[in-house]
Image (cartoon, grey):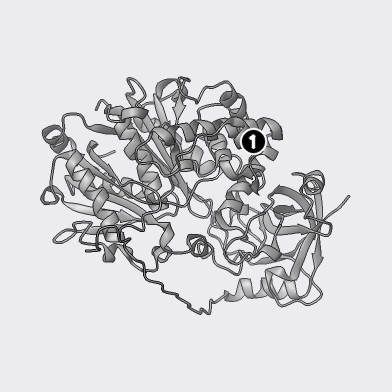
Amino acid sequence: MGRAVAVIGTGQTRHGRRDDVSYPDLIKEAVKAAFEDAGITSQDIDAVVYGSMPSMMEGVAYNHFYFADALRVVGKPLLRTETCGSTGQSIAHTGIYWIASGMADIILVVGSEKQHEGDAQATMTTIPEAFMHADFVGGAPVAFSMQSREWMGHFNIDEDKAREAAAIISVDCHDGGLKNPYAHIRVNITKEDAMKARIITYPVRLLDVCPSSDGACAVIFASEDKAKKICKKPAWVKGTGFRGEEYFSGDSSKAVWQSAIEASKEAYKQAGITDPLKELDVAEVYNPFTYQQLMFLECLGFCPPGESPDYVVKGVFSPGGKLFCNPSGGVLCTNPIGAAGLIRLAEAAMQVTGKAGAIQVEGAKLALSHAMGGALQFNGITILGSEL
Amino acid sequence: MAEKNEKPRTIHTVLRVPFEMALGPTWTRFFEGLREKKILGTKCKECGRILVPARPFCPRCFEPMEEWVEVAQEGTIITWSYVNYTYFGVTADMIPIVPTRIKLDGVDGGWGGRIGGFDIKDFDLVNKKVKVGARVKAVWSGERHGHLRDIEYWEIIE
C-alpha cells in the first residue's frame, strides 16, 4: 500500500447555479477554503491533481489550463485524471498514490463542474461514440434507469417495493440537503411526493433524479509525517479500490455490478474490514439516482444481493439506522459531476474528524466514500478513518 | 468589477465540429450486415463467446475474433426504460421512447435497441407488455443505410 496518507483539509463551494462567478472564480472558492481548513498555503503543496467531466461541457477543451492560476500550479507539476462520474474518486486516488509512493508529501486535489455553462447532456451524448451507441437516447438518465430495471428484473424485485424504498432514500437525502450548507437542492419532500412524482425515465421519477449543478471541491492530502505536524485531526486513508469494465455495457451484468463489488472488496481488504454494515459508521454512496443507491447498497456489501429494498424500508440506512448513508444529501441533492465523487470523500473526511456540523453522525470513526463512472464502467472507493 | 446590484453577465458561444470516424474492417462488415438484414457477431476462439455487435478482438481474452456468425433475430429483454422527457437531440415529437437491452438467442451479453410496434404513448400498456424476460424480434426498416437504426424497432412476441 505504500506510505500512509491522510486528508488534512477540505473545501467546497456553495453548489447550485453559479453564473454569479466565472469558472476560475469558482475553483478559487474551493481551493481557498481547503487551504484555510488545512491551515497551509499553496507554497506548502508539492503538486496538483485536477479532474472534471469532458471539458467541453463548459466549452473549453482543457479547462485546467483556463483556471491554472486558481489551481495554484505555477512552479508545480499538474496531473489530470478523468473517468466520468467516478472522476472525484480517481483524482483522489491519483493524489493518494503520489504521496504513498514517496514522490510527494502534500497534494492538492480539485474536482469541479459548471453544468449551467453549456448543455451538459449534449456533451454527455459524446461520451460513447455515436455509431455503436446511436440509441443512447436520453443519455445518462436512461443508462442508469436501464441499469436499475436490469437489477429489479434480475432479482425479481417487486416494483412497488422498490418504488417505496427509492422514495425513502429520496426523503432521507432531501432532508440531508436541507441541513447541508453546501447542497444545491433544498426542498422539504414527503414519501408520497417522491412516489407520485412524474416518470422521467422509467422506473425513475422526478424526485429520484439528481440536479445539474455548478460547484467545486478541493481536498488536501499529506504524508504521515506532514499530516502529524500540520493537522490536529487528520482523516486517514484506510483503503482504496478501483475497478473497470468493458466498453460495451451489454458485455457484463450491470445488475450484479462486478466493478462495484470488486472495488469495495479491495478497499475493505486494505482497511481490514470484514463486515462493512457493522464496522462502518457512515457512508457517502454515489447516488445520482435513488434506484442506483439501492443497487450499490448490495454491491458494496451492506446487505445481501436483491434485499436492499427490505433493508431500506426497515430504516437500516436512514438517520439513526445501523449505517446512515448520505447524510450530506448525496449526489441526489448536489451534482457538480467532476466534483461529486470528491465531495463524497470530503464529506467522509468531515465525518471522521467531527467537522460535519449539522449533518454530523455522532462519534463517526470509519467512513466509506464511493463514486461510479465511465459508460457504466467504473467504480471507485476510498475509506477514511479517524485513527491511522 | 460589476457595479453593485448588477448581475455579472455571460457570453454566448456555439461550437459545431464535424468528424469522420473510421469504423475499421470489423465494424464496416457489421454495418454492411445490417444493410442486408443480417445481425453479425464474432466468436472468440479462446473463451468461445459470441458478441454482438461484432468485435475485432475479445474484450476479455484480447484474442482476435475472426470467426463470423450470423445470429438469431429474436431474443429476450434484459432491461428496458421509458423515456418521457425532452433532451439534447430528443424533441417533444420523438417521445416517449422505450429503449431496451436484449440478449439475442445464442449470443453472449446484451445489445441495445428500442421497443415499438404498438401504442407506446400509453405507459400502462407498455408496462404490461414490456417485461424483463419477454421475447422480442427485430423489425427491419424499409430503407437501410448500414446504420443501427436499420432495425426500426424490436417487436414483442406475444
Disc 1 marks which residue? A195
Is A383 positioned to the left or the right of A190 in the image?
A: left
Residue A346 visible in image: yes
Return the residue nearer the eye: A90 or A214: A214
User: Chain ID for label 1?
Assistant: A
| Percent coordinates x, y for residue A163 in the rendering | 65, 34
Residue A238 visible in image: no
Q: Residue at left 62%, top 71%? A: B27
Return the residue nearer the eye: B101 or A353: A353
| Percent coordinates x, y for residue A285 in the rendering | 45, 37
Q: In which quarter of the image is residue A157?
A: top right
Q: Residue at left 53%, top 51%? A: A376
Please state, as top left, top right, bottom left or bottom right, where the N terminus of chain A lies in the image. Answer: top left
Q: Residues within 10 Å of mark 1 (few under 14, many from 20)?
A: many
Q: How many numbered marks, from 0 up?
A: 1
Is A175 positioned to the left or the right of B9 in the image?
A: right
Q: Quadrant of residue A221?
A: top left
